Image: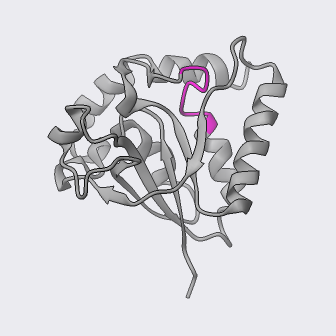
Amino acid sequence: MAEYKKAIFAGGCFWCMVAPFDTLPGVKSVISGYTGGHKENPTYEEVCSHTTGHLEAVEITYDPDKMSYEKLLSYYWQVVDPTDEMGQFQDRGETYRPVIYYNDETEKALAEKSKQELADSGKFDKPIVVAIEPAQKFWPAEDYHQYFYQKNPLRYMMEEAGGRASFIEKHWSKNN
């Protein structure tokens, strides 16, 4: 039986962070939730009130024999705007800032290395500003937020139309 690991990434609306990781080989689950704040077991309404300190994030459970942490980082960079530290696309504010949360010093070093490689690539005209912070308690979001892209495909497509899809196409298409 595989020994699974967990990675936690914040990158704007958690609805938009599930689908890119959900079908990757070796990924067992992608859970929408909250992390980084001071309130125990926060609700969506509390997080949206900007009083809990939490960010919307996803917790990815994966088999490291089939999917490396480095590969997850590579996918992460391709689904966020790494130059926007105060939100992502139409989602603005502290609860939507992009963060890579690390569980140990190895993950921290890998995250910092991947961030530097992206900065050195010249792919972006602005600095890479995604924070790299120690993982904190992850609180799963309410059930209606889980796998939103499958439950509400039309609304999910509207979220993607808010700039994320076109940004990804512009910066990560095979022609760029």
Name the spot of residue 172 as percent of width and height, x first.
66, 26
Name the spot of residue 36 as percent of width and height, x first.
41, 47
Q: Residue furthest top?
A: 125
Number of residue marks:
0
At 25% from the left and 57% from the top, the residue drawn is 40
At 72% from the left and 11% from the top, the residue drawn is 125
State which region is magenta.
77-84
Q: Is residue 126 magenta?
A: no
When asked about the image quadrant of residue 93, the answer is top left
The figure's colour scheme reads one colour
Q: Is residue 125 left or right of residue 14?
A: right
Name the spot of residue 154 as percent of width and height, x first.
24, 30
- Which one is in front, 72 or 25? 72
Look at the image and tell me in which quarter the C terminus lies.
top right
Position above or below: 64 against 169: below
Name the spot of residue 115 as percent of width and height, x first.
73, 37
Position above or below: 81 against 98: above
Q: Residue furthest bottom?
A: 1
When asked about the image quadrant of residue 161, the answer is top left
Q: Main secondary structure of the magenta part?
A: loop
Q: Is residue 80 magenta?
A: yes
- Which one is in front, 137 or 14? 137
At 19% from the left and 56% from the top, the residue drawn is 143
Position above or below: 167 against 17: above
Position above or below: 33 against 165: below
